[in-house]
Image (spheres, coloured by chain):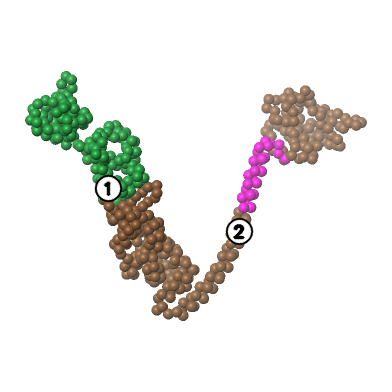
Amino acid sequence: MSFEWPWQYSFPPFFTLQPNVDTRQKQLAAWCSLALSYCRHHKLYTLDVMEAQESPVFNNKKIERKLSMEAIQVVFEELRKKGNLDWLDKNKSRCLVMWRRPEEWGKLIHQWVSKIGMVNSVFTLYELSNGDDTEGEEFHGLEDWMLLRSLQALQADGKAEIITMDDGKGVKFF
Amino acid sequence: SCHWTSTHRLIWRDVKNHECCIAMPLSQILLFEEQAAGIGKSAKIVIHLQATPANKEPGPYQHSKYSFIKLSFKEHGQIEFYRRLTEEMTRKRWENTPASQPIPIGTGSQAGRTRAVGIVGIERKIEEKRKETDKNISEAFEDLSKLMVKAKEMVELSRSIANKIKDKQFGLRSYLLSMGIADPVTRETHGSGTHYHMQLAKQLDDMLQAPLEERGGMMALTEVYCLVNRARGMELLSPEDLVNACKMFESLKLPLRLRVFDSGVMVVQLQSHSEEEMIASALDNVSDKGSLTAEEFAKLLGLSVLLSKERLLLAEKMGHLCRDDSVEGLRFYPNLF
């Protein structure tokens, strides 16, 4: 299924950071939504800022418009404030994109565990992300760092406990 | 050639080329003697010299195998010279005081002399240029004074015509005003200060109604300034006076307003001029064409680019338009966000 671009993507002003505050808020909301859905569609979990400027998300060659570096940083900052982005380095050159926030992932995983009636059992992380049983689930193939954060979120909520075992980590759900 | 001696030096000067000089410190002289003239030989004075000092100044020769020089006196002067030299050698005044006066022609460093000439030359050039400029300006003003005299005659003529036309004919009067016939409110007739500005404000109201109508109810203050001063001809308004007069529109309950945009641009607008209408029409125009630049909008409305841009910016501020800023320029779109 090919990615569907939102109407704003073909609207030239979308690529200019709007000076009117109200207009800008709407613009940024649209950008955040677009960036996240693009990453979700392509299962991208990290973004490099330099590469981002040339990626189709921020660069619409058809209308010959692209978001300036300054504007991209503004969009990223907006995503960070909403909890969808984390910087990997101090220079803000690479970031983790959480098109689904850890809490949301945690909820999905817990729901599945409940559904198959395996609460109080211990799973390895590998089992969760790559096990045969989880195939078809949305969190199948989830990258380790993301999975860990999601479980940590559950843990903070009292719904799980992360256990350190000899050959890695495991988790018990409550 | 010509020799003479100062208290410190023995100097030889070329009679033809006065700028050619050789000098030798007297302290170099060991002893000297006369040599009488003979047949075919002129009288001479032979001067025996000490060894070359290390700080010898450059001269005709750096080294010589001879330790003496001979001064030749072709005509006369030998006796006088010998006497003088003796006197100086006895007194040895150079041991007490350093050589003070430079030789009149100046055998001082070549560089120094050239420098003096250079600066003097430049100063002279600057002075000449200044005189020339002065002359040009005076000539130009001559023409201007003649022009002013003519202008004064024209204003007198127009004034007498204007007086014959009744005030009732509003349209005709304002056209005459724009052609340069007026009864200018001047500081002389009305003094300076608020009273003056009040009268000025009233005159402006009179003068600007028609032009404002023509231009959609708004004019940049600079346009007003030009229009008004062109009409006055003499007794021109200063920008300050214009602004101060405009500031009085509201308090005098005149149907004009002075307005300042965010960008700092000042305009005079008819009070009846409606903001909403202006913004709505801007939105209409932009929607109609899909998008517009300030220049395109100006052309569409027949307004100056400056005022057109202000309108678009205002509509953007109100949230009706949004902008597309790219290498192609600044373009405004309806705000679809």
- Asked if the residue at tag 1 contacts the one at tag 2, i.e. Cβ–Cβ closer than 8 Å, the answer is no
Q: Chain B in the picture: what colour?
A: brown
Is-magenta flag for residue B148?
A: no
Secondary structure at badge 2 equals: helix
Which chain is disc 1 placed on? Answer: A
Label 2 vs label 1: CA separation? 68 Å
Image quarter for residue B93?
Answer: top right
Tell which residue pokes out farthest to the front in this image: A1
- Percent x, y for residue B142? 59, 64
Query: Looking at the rendering, in which quadrant would you find the N terminus of chain B?
Result: top right
Residue span colored magenta: B105-129
Where is B121 relative to B71, above or below?
below
Q: How many marks?
A: 2
Q: Given this view, does label 2 or label 1 mark the residue nearer the observer?
A: 1
Secondary structure at badge 1 equals: helix
Image quarter for residue B89?
Answer: top right
What's under tag 1, amino acid-wise? Answer: Trp
What's under tag 2, amino acid-wise? Answer: Asn
Q: Which chain did the image draw in green? A: A
State the residue position of label 2: B136
Which chain is disc 2 placed on? Answer: B
Where is A71 relative to B285, above or below?
above
State the residue position of label 1: A7
Image quarter for residue B63?
Answer: top right
Identified at 62% across, 48% down, the residue is: B123
Circle 1 residues within 10 Å: few <14, some 14–19, many ≥20? few
Identified at 66% across, 43% down, the residue is: B117
